[in-house]
Structures are given as structure tokens and as C-alpha cells.
């Protein structure tokens, strides 16, 4: 198949983006990496009248990392994020997840903001954003706004972004203290989309007691979710096997997985619990090291 006819415009700056989006009256699509949009265009599952290319806008690319957070321009390539020393140091959980995003060719073109805006339930970057309470910036001709990751995703391939908005930045906060991370996913083949993915970050005190934990599950429900009940049960424990198993009973009870041709809901639930146990243990061991 071939894409339906559309107009193409390469935006010179953000004001140009906003002008083009406003003029398209909701019928435009933004392209950066194009790793999802191009196949959708070819299959005619997306039929915009205008495609707005943001690759030439310098302020939408780049990485700024310090002791408080790691900020990405929306059009930053995933490979640049994966290879950045600041990401490895300050956002190791994101680095672990980025290594499993698609194929090398996908990461060479795919962008951080594009993955978030696409909102695939199985996407690793969206899962890390939800797990670490990332803050997403969106701008339009009417101004800008900050969106918490827990309010950003509204469903499979759906976000709170309006047709006139452009995702411009995302910031992942850095946790202080002794921190460990773990990331696991299950897919039919390496580089396939994840049937289930689990991300975990923990902080422990000098006695090895968990003072903070974030546990996220992706691929199971239409949006990435936090296992908040399990998190609460693990605070104040030493994250031993008995503590983890007891807490994950609540995950099995509260998770509401999808059932489709790839996997049943029951399978996704069982895998999520199994992967969660492994990621928590990995994060604990890393924090203790």
C-alpha cells in the first residue's frame, strides 16, 4: 500500500510548528523519528492532510543532566540518550529500558518525545516515565503546560495532547541516596514489542531498609501503571523474598491485564508478578552493592 496524499512542511522553529498545526485544524501529524507514523501512513491507518517535520528545530533536541533530573528535548534520538554518560549516571533505569527499545535501527531514528506521544502500551520509555513520575512539557500557540506522567496517558495510543500541541521536553527526576534499579520484559523475540514489562527503582537506608520504591508495569493494561499497593507494602522492609512475595500478592489482585491474540490476561498477570519479583530483587541488590 501507499500513503494517502498529504502535504509536507519542515518547520523552521516552534512558532512555525504552532502556525502549521493551527492552520491544519486538527488534521496534522508531527513527525520526528517516524518509526511509528511512517508505517501507519503506508497502511493508511493515519490519514493526515499535513505532516509537520520538527527535525530541524535545535531547541527540541539535547540532553541536560544533573543531580536533580535528566531533561530531554522531545526530538532527541533514543540512541543519543542510550549512549549519554549523564543518562547512565543519573537515570540508569531509563538506560536499561532504552537498550530494549526495538532494533538498533529503530533507536537510531526514534525519539524520546515521539515514543511518549505515540503512547504504545508496550513502549519502554512511557513505562519509565510513569514509573519515575516524569514531567512532560507541551506547547502550543496558546502557551505551554507541564503534564505529570500519571495524567499524560489516557489509553492505548492516546494522550492528553491536543491536536494543536507539540510535546517539547520531558524531565525524569533523580532520586538521592542509595538507589538501585531493575528492568525486565517478556517478548516473543528480542526487539519485539513487550507482552509485559516491569520497571523498578528502590532507595534504601544504611541499614538496608527500603525508604522509597517505584514499581511500574507496561504492556499489560492500555496504559503503563504503577503497582502502588505493592509499593506501600514494601516501604520499611528489607526487601527480602518473603516481603516481595507478600507485596506482589496485591499486584496479582489489582492488575487488570489485556487479553488478545498475543497473550491471555491470565498469562500477562502471571508474567507481571514473576518479572516484578525479579526486578525488585535486582534493584535491591544494586542498591546494596
Image: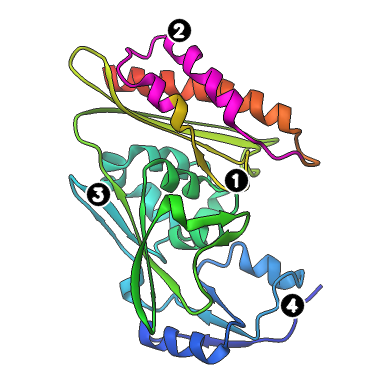
Residue 69 - label: 3
Where does the image place residue 147, in percent across and percent down from the top left?
38, 60
Q: Is residue 289 visible?
A: no
Q: What's the distance in space between the residues labelled 3 and 1, CA to CA?
A: 24 Å
Dot label at residue 3: 4
Any mark on residue 277, and which? none
Q: Is residue 32 above or below residue 262?
A: below
Closest to the observer, 85 or 166: 166
Q: Give the quadrant of the C terminus.
A: top left
Q: On the picture, is 279 further left or further right than 158?
A: left
> Disc 3, disc 1: CB below 8 Å?
no
Coordinates of residue 109 in the picture (x, y in percent): 51, 62
Q: Mark 4 to mark 2: distance in Å?
A: 54 Å
- Span highlighted in magenta in the image: 231-259
Residue highlighted by disc 1: 122
**Disc nearer the start of the sequence (3/1):** 3
Q: CA distance from mark 4 to mark 3?
A: 40 Å
Measure the C-alpha gap from mark 1 to mark 2: 29 Å
Mark with earlier residue (4, 3)? 4
Chain-order first, disc 4 or disc 2: 4
Amino acid at each position: 500500500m501507499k500513503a494517502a496524499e498529504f502535504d509536507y512542511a519542515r518547520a523552521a522553529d516552534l512558532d512555525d510548528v504552532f502556525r502549521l498545526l493551527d492552520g491544519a485544524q486538527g488534521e496534522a501529524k508531527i513527525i520526528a523519528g517516524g518509526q511509528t507514523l511512517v508505517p501507519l501512513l503506508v497502511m493508511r491507518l493515519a490519514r493526515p492532510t499535513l505532516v509537520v517535520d520538527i527535525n530541524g528545530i535545535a531547541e527540541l533536541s539535547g540532553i541536560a543532566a544533573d543531580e536533580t533530573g535528566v531533561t530531554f528535548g522531545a526530538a532527541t534520538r533514543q540512541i543519543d540518550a542510550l549512549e549519554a554518560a549523564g543518562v547512565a549516571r543519573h537515570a540508569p533505569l531509563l538506560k536499561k529500558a532504552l537498550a530494549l527499545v526495538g532494533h538498533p535501527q529503530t533507536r537510531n531514528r526514534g525519539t524520546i518525545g515521539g515514543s511518549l506521544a505515540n503512547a504504545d502500551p508496550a513502549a519502554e520509555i512511557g513505562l519509565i516515565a510513569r514509573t519515575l513520575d516524569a514531567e512532560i512539557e507541551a506547547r502550543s500557540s496558546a502557551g505551554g503546560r507541564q503534564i505529570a506522567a500519571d495524567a499524560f496517558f489516557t489509553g492505548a495510543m492516546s494522550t492528553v495532547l491536543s491536536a494543536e500541541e507539540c510535546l517539547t521536553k520531558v524531565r525524569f527526576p533523580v532520586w538521592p541516596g542509595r538507589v538501585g534499579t531493575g528492568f525486565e520484559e517478556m517478548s516473543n523475540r528480542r526487539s519485539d514489542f513487550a507482552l509485559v514489562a516491569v520497571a523498578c527503582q528502590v532507595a534504601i537506608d544504611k541499614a538496608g531498609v527500603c525508604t522509597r520504591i517505584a514499581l511500574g508495569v507496561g504492556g499489560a493494561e492500555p496504559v503503563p501503571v504503577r503497582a502502588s499497593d505493592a509499593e506501600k507494602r514494601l516501604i520499611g522492609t528489607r526487601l527480602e523474598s518473603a516481603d516481595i512475595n507478600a507485596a506482589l500478592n496485591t499486584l496479582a489482585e489489582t492488575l487488570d491485564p489485556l487479553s488478545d491474540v498475543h497473550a491471555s490476561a491470565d498469562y500477562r498477570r502471571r508474567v507481571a508478578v514473576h518479572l516484578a519479583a525479579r526486578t525488585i530483587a535486582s534493584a535491591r541488590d544494586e542498591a546494596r552493592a
